[in-house]
Image: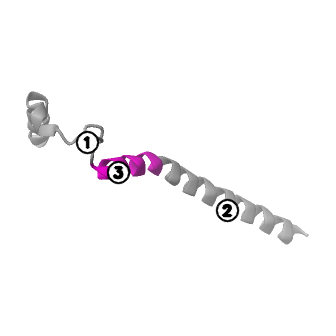
């Protein structure tokens, strides 16, 4: 019964691989005239750096605050 849960996904994958014309929404294919593809590609490429920078910055600030609190508390 559990194998039936994967059946729709497998059928969709087989359909896309069997008929590649249906999956023509490629971000690189539309770069000739529409600026929306360019901006979506730029946004998606910058997201990992923005997320990593945000998490790294939050960790650095937390570390500095903890270190300064320990120095002020022990003095």
Left or right of 73, for residue 16: left
Q: Quadrant of residue 60?
A: bottom right
Q: Closer to the observer: label 2 or label 3? A: 3
Q: Closer to the observer: label 3 or label 1? A: 1
Q: Quadrant of residue 4?
A: top left
Label 2 sits on a secondary structure element that is: helix
Q: Closer to the observer: label 1 or label 2? A: 1
Q: Residue furthest right?
A: 75
Left or right of 64, for residue 29: left
Residue under label 3: 40
For label 3, count other residues whose C-alpha is less than 10 Å away and answer few (under 14), some (14-19) or many (20+): few
* Residue at 71% in and 59% down: 63
Whether 23 is among the magenta residues is: no
Whether 44 is among the magenta residues is: yes
* Residue at 25% in and 37% down: 29
The reply to whether dot 2 and dot 3 touch (C-beta < 8 Å) is: no
The reply to whether dot 1 and dot 2 touch (C-beta < 8 Å) is: no
- Mark 2 and mark 3: Cα distance apart in space: 33 Å
* Rendered location of residue 3, percent (x, y): 12, 37
Which range of residues does the magenta coloring cover?
A: 34-47
Residue under label 1: 30
* Rendered location of residue 74, percent (x, y): 87, 68
Question: Which quadrant does the C terminus fall into?
Answer: bottom right
Q: Which of the numbered marks, if any, corresponds to residue 62?
A: 2
């Amino acid at each position: 019964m559990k194998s039936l849960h994967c059946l729709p996904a497998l059928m969709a994958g087989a359909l896309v691989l069997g008929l590649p014309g249906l999956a023509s929404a490629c971000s690189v294919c539309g770069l000739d005239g529409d600026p929306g593809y360019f901006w979506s590609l730029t946004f998606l490429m910058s997201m990992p750096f923005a997320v990593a920078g945000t998490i790294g910055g939050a960790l650095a600030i937390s570390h500095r605050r903890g270190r300064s609190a320990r120095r002020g508390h022990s003095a």
